[in-house]
Image (tube, rainbow, N blue to C red):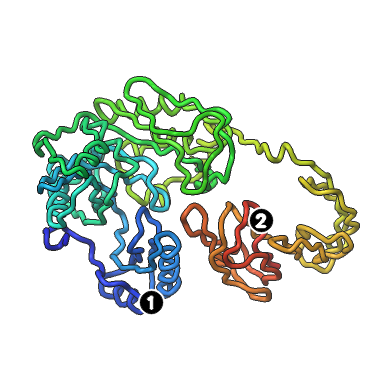
Amino acid sequence: IMQQADVPIVPGTTDPVEEPEEVVEFGEDNGWPVAIKAEGGGGGRGMKVVRDPDEAEDQLESAKREGEAYFDNDSVYLERYLENPRHIEVQILADHHGNVRHLGERDCSLQRRHQKVIEEGPSPALTDDLREEIGEAARRGVREANYYNAGTVEFLVEDRDREDGELLDVGDDFYFLEVNTRIQVEHCVTEQITGIDIVKWQLRVAQDEEVTFAQDDVEIDGHAMEFRINAENAADDFAPATGGTLETYDPPGGVGVRMDDALRQGDDLVTDYDSMIAKLIVDGEDRQEVIERGKRALAEYEIEGIHTIIPFHRLMLEDDAFVAGHHTTKYLDEELDPERIDEAQERWGKEIESAAEDDEEVTERIFTVEVNGKRFEVDLEERGAPALDLGTVDTSGGGGGGQRPDRAGPDSGESGGGGGGGGSTATAAGQQVTAEMQGTVLDVNVAEGDGVEAGDVLLVLEAMKMENDIVAESGGTVTEVAVGPDQSVDMGDPLVIID
């Protein structure tokens, strides 16, 4: 349909892809890397990037698995993967009477793992001529599809090396990505700069009303940004919180500040869907004013009891690349120094204490451990369990210093002793690979006795709608696999032991 409407599209397939050989053939014909995308997906979910033929089989299987898990549809298609794009989306409104309006564009290029974190409008990287060209392409595509409703037409615009102040212009390449046939999280940005209530118009269109304003009546006034307030620790690779209570919740206000939220002080965090708990939208006369107002609003936003990415947002408003508008969708994952996020978390983050731990009985356990003929006493604290006499743990035959059993059985005096418990309790000495977050084991790639090297994928863990490869930090032999497919794990649970 987009081709018929003369909308530029990324080279890709229109029929479902079933075999890895099809991925390899597409990559050889159109160039690597290749994106495998779930038919029902969006926001990076169900999308895998294949950089060479050797990855085709595993990534195809993973994309189909995510599509089935999240969208009840394992159908996937292929696209050429653009290496350095900006994510530009056009808000549209179309009625049953053939009227199609675009309400300007939003720039959603600041993303981690294809998930948006800051959205703004208008884009700081486009000339007026290019934004109008993209907006008209969106209208043509929607009209050709006979679509009605509110919606968003998303594009990828290939960025290039630009001098400060230089903008992308007519002649720079842009490609259709997808249509989101719904209200999006970031629709608030467009509402603030157009004065148009998109949700109200969505309902009016559904009741067969006709859009009463012309395209020329749509005016973009000023600038706006939306900060997704996610319950995540940006310094821990944006790991989502798995629970907690909003001990303090005091959102900002004032001129140019809009809050869309639902939780209130004392509420428990809900983690069943995704990690976003609120949206902070800031508008002003121009982008610089929005950045200054955003700094104030984020500094005034008080949340205690859970981690949020507020420190990360504050960092971005002081980041040269973001402030200059030179960031792309790859900036966070590939260019930003992670140490800067760590520093922001330390500077502006809150210390989080676990109330559950405070309520549990704490038992001190003293181990006598023998390593290569030398004895050491190790004091450990265990919560929620009675004291056990574990005796002496002998690891003199167990290889290099520093190795120790994570648990030994009450009747065992040697490493690898009984200890029972089952489930995800590891009993072998060696490098313990643990879950970094709460999730579900999707696939286990190793078995006891397998040799592995650093970087090998041990298993796949699903958490917060995304698959995470759990890899070996060093080589060795797998001595224990503590989990199986479809098993739920908590943060810190042992997964695999490598000796």
Crowd rating for badge 1 (residues with CA inside 10 Å; few <14, some 14–19, many 20+): some
Q: Position of residue 25 (x, y in %)?
A: 30, 77
Residue 380 vertical position relative to residue 294 in the rendered view, above or below: below
Q: Amino acid at mark 2?
A: Asp
Reading the image, the residue beneath label 1 is: 20
Residue at 44% in and 71% down: 61
Residue 53 vertical position relative to residue 169 in the rendered view, above or below: below
In the current view of this chain or complex, which residue is farthest to the front? 207
Q: Position of residue 88 (x, y in %)?
A: 25, 47
Q: Quadrant of the C terminus?
A: bottom right
Q: Position of residue 17 (x, y in %)?
A: 33, 73
Q: Are marks 1 and 2 in contact (CB under 8 Å)?
A: no
Q: Which SS class for mark 1?
A: helix
Q: Position of residue 87 (x, y in %)?
A: 29, 49
Q: Which mark is residue 262?
A: none
Residue 346 vertical position relative to residue 49 in the rendered view, above or below: above
Q: Quadrant of the N terminus?
A: bottom left
Reading the image, the residue beneath label 2 is: 493
Total labels drawn? 2
- Is 406 on the left-hand or right-hand side of 262? right
Q: Amino acid at mark 1?
A: Pro
Q: Quadrant of residue 276?
A: top left
